Image: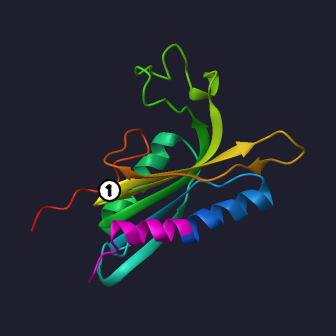
């Protein structure tokens, strides 16, 4: 079996996952959080497969329970890649400014003065990471989306909803 490369997985996100999130938001005014797991094993049974399987996991509830479920599915599927779609708050830090912890003195990013509400799509692949953001604009009667922002050169991701894809041992 051949794994999808990082570039092929980014293409899957761009051509299938992101348009689906946009369509969902356009029709319903929100995005239901979901995980898309590309794995070598059946995520229900752990049985080895002769081709990659895509498992779609709708998510709801407590963040710790959601995180544990995503990790369980990724582990059982022997995940090559994990794509996570959710709504949230984002704060962009400039490259030339000294690091300022956006959470300092705040419970959530929702309290940060420079926050931006976004649809966030993160991709963890055994060979790299990527992130896409779509700003949510609430300046009319119905929310709309701003332009897609892409970062496909991420060496690592941090946060509660990351770290699902286990690094593969070198052959």
The quadrant the N terminus occupies is bottom left
Q: Which residue is more in the foreground, 7 or 42?
A: 7
Residue 113 in percent (x, y) is at 64, 21
Q: Residue at x 68, y 60 (%)?
A: 22
What crowding class fits label 1: few (fewer than 14 Cα within 10 Å), some (14-19), or many (20 or more)? some
Residue 143 in percent (x, y) is at 80, 47
Q: Is residue 33 left or right of residue 73?
A: right
Name the image colouring: rainbow
Question: Residue 20 sits in which quadrant?
Answer: bottom right
Q: Which residue is more in the foreground, 15 or 68?
A: 15
Residue 91 in percent (x, y) is at 55, 31
State the SS at label 1: strand
Question: Residue 73 sits in which quadrant?
Answer: bottom left
Q: Is residue 68 left or right of residue 147?
A: left
Q: Residue furthest top?
A: 105
Is 99 placed above or below 78 here? above
The quadrant the C terminus occupies is bottom left
Q: Which residue is mark 1?
A: 128
Q: Main secondary structure of the magenta part?
A: helix
Q: Which residues are magenta?
A: 1-14
Residue 155 in percent (x, y) is at 31, 48
Q: Residue furthest right?
A: 141
Look at the image and say whether residue 41 sits in the magenta stretch. Answer: no
Q: Residue furthest front?
A: 96
Question: Residue 158 sits in which quadrant?
Answer: top left
Q: Residue at x 78, y 52 (%)?
A: 29
């Amino acid at each position: 079996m051949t794994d999808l490369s990082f570039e092929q997985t980014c293409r899957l996100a761009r051509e299938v996952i992101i348009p689906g999130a946009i369509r969902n938001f356009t029709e319903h005014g929100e995005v239901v959080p979901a995980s898309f797991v590309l794995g070598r094993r059946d995520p229900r049974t752990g049985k080895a497969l002769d081709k990659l399987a895509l498992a779609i996991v709708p998510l709801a509830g407590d963040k710790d329970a959601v995180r544990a479920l995503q990790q369980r599915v990724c582990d059982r599927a022997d995940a090559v890649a994990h794509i996570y779609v959710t709504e949230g708050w984002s704060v962009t830090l400039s490259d030339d400014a000294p690091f300022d912890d956006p959470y300092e003195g705040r419970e959530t990013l929702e309290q940060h003065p420079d926050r931006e509400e976004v649809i966030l799509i993160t991709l963890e692949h055994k060979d790299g990471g990527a992130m896409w953001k779509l700003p949510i604009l609430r300046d009319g009667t119905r929310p709309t989306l701003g332009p897609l922002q892409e970062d496909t050169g991420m060496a690592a991701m941090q946060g509660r909803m990351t770290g699902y894809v286990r690094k593969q041992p070198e052959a």
